[in-house]
Amino acid sequence: MSKKLVKSGLIVSFMTLVSRVLGLVRDGVIAYVMGINAATDVFFFANKIPNFFRRLFAEGAFAQAFVPVLSEYQALDEKEGTGQQQTRQLIAQASGTLGVLLTLVTLFGMLASPLFVMLFGFGWFTDWLSDGPSAPKFELASALLKITFPYLWFISLTALAGSILNTLGKFAVSSFTPVLLNVCIISTAIWGSPYFENPAYALAWGVFLGGLVQFLFQLPFLWQAQALPKPKWAWSAPGVVKIRTLIIPALFGVSVTQINLLLDTLIASFLVTGSISWLYFADRLLEFPLGLFGIGIATVILPRLSGLHARENGGEFGQTISWSLKVVTLMGLPALAGLMVLAQPIIMVLFMRGEFDQADVLQVSYALFAYLSGLMSFMFIKVLAPGYYARQDTKTPVRIGIKAMVANMVFNLVLAPVFGYVGLAIATVLSATLNASLLYMGLRKQGVFSIDKKLLTFFVRALISALVMAALVHALSPEFSVWLTMSLPSQIAWLSAYIAIGVSCYFATIIALGVRLKDFKVENRE
């Protein structure tokens, strides 16, 4: 693989690491200030709705449709020697059109917040109608959503700016930007919550400010890159029409996981108080390795794959996907194994203080165990989906996405009555595994990419190394009851030691099994 791509991957992963660490600090602060209660459930709900639409409008479907078209226009400018004329025009048209649509959606979301709560928190709505015990949740959620919904406007345009910078090879800025959101939420939680009777309002305003700060932070870098033309409405412009054509099916294809999470939230609104929060904290721990490796690599390869497709370089196209699978497997499997055997002490160290107690540690760990069983499926989706979108093929992923979403609904209905909130996590994993499998089979059928013997051998070696690591750390780690008797400094010290032992064991084993650095090199044919 070219040094430029590896360097970009390292930059994105490092910046994502900083963001994820601060994200865990943010969640620890929320756990301390709020604990696990009805207000916590409602805040996470009010935060999830605009984030879902963000992935539809920006980081998900829009980015997957916009980046390939932008790469095509860049290649056209290079071929015709027109500088950045056509590229800048596309940016102006896309940002202006998206901005108008976002403004309308955001205003509607603020005005119709009770409608969204009714749709995605139907259990709370029915209680509100019958004056049941969850009625206050419906009212609080409607109020908080009016504050958090504008985050959609800010972060969607921030994601658009990030897509432009990524396509220009400037990955550090967009990867660092989420740090600012975490800083804003942490600040409002610590210093703002005393000014509100319900600290959930302070957190909601933190989300609002985080979106605003992220948006403003990107603008100087766009200006410096000469990629900040005056936005204009251009619904019928050729480039925008092409993006629209690609984005409609991509709304389903790339956002299936998010739609599944919203379905989980809908069903969880009928379950015991705390279910949404337990799933949230488990998902946050899952998102750490997923964001660090899966999303980080996917961010880098989409512009790369789009450029290779525009230049009709099919050989390196498949090699790039293969390289991506190797990297996420190399880093994802030990993360999965480590989180699985050290789940409860990690949750204790990060969250068990203030209103977050021992019972919450156990409840979160059960959901985390379920989510972790699908970590590799989530990661593979992130690196396989760009194989379609880079070739401007959005029809295949949407068909796959619909199948996975329907399967998730069925799994939810079967598993939730039996396993409660843990059943929701299991259903999400099963549908993600189906999604990843179908994405791979589609690429293989189209002749774009297939797993060869060399890659399969690497998978087996990585799996054996992760199992050896898990067995060793599990044998050394004390029982949960012993962890409870330790002070926080002792917990951190022992946890750090076990993580170091596990990482050393994993890489020593995988090297002993024959994996070398040269296995991650791909011939650069450009």
Image: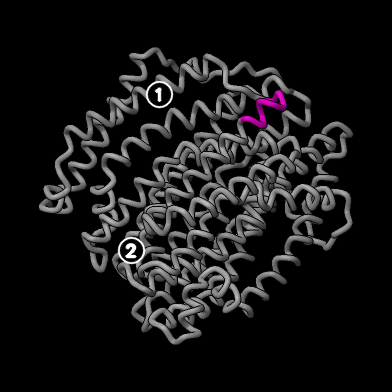
Q: How is the image coloured?
A: one colour
Which label sits on residue 462? 1
Could you say where residue 426 lies in the image, as x and y percent from the top left?
A: 43, 48
Q: Does the segment drawn in magenta span residue 333?
A: no
Residue 76 visible in rendering: yes
| Magenta extent | 441-448
Residue occupied by mark 2: 29
Q: Residue furthest bottom?
A: 131
What secondary structure is found at the residue carrying circle 1?
helix
Please say if the residues under marks 2 and 1 sit with CB atoms less than 8 Å apart: no
Q: CA distance from mark 2 to mark 1?
A: 35 Å
Q: Residue 472 is drawn in which quadrant?
A: top left
Query: Residue at the location (26% across, 68% down)?
Result: 355
318 and 265: which is toward the camera: 265
What secondary structure is found at the residue carrying circle 2?
helix
The correct choice, above or below, for 5 with respect to 361 in the image is above
Q: Amino acid at mark 1?
A: Ala
Q: Residues within 10 Å of mark 2 (few under 14, many from 20)?
A: many
- Upstream in sequence: badge 2 or badge 1: 2
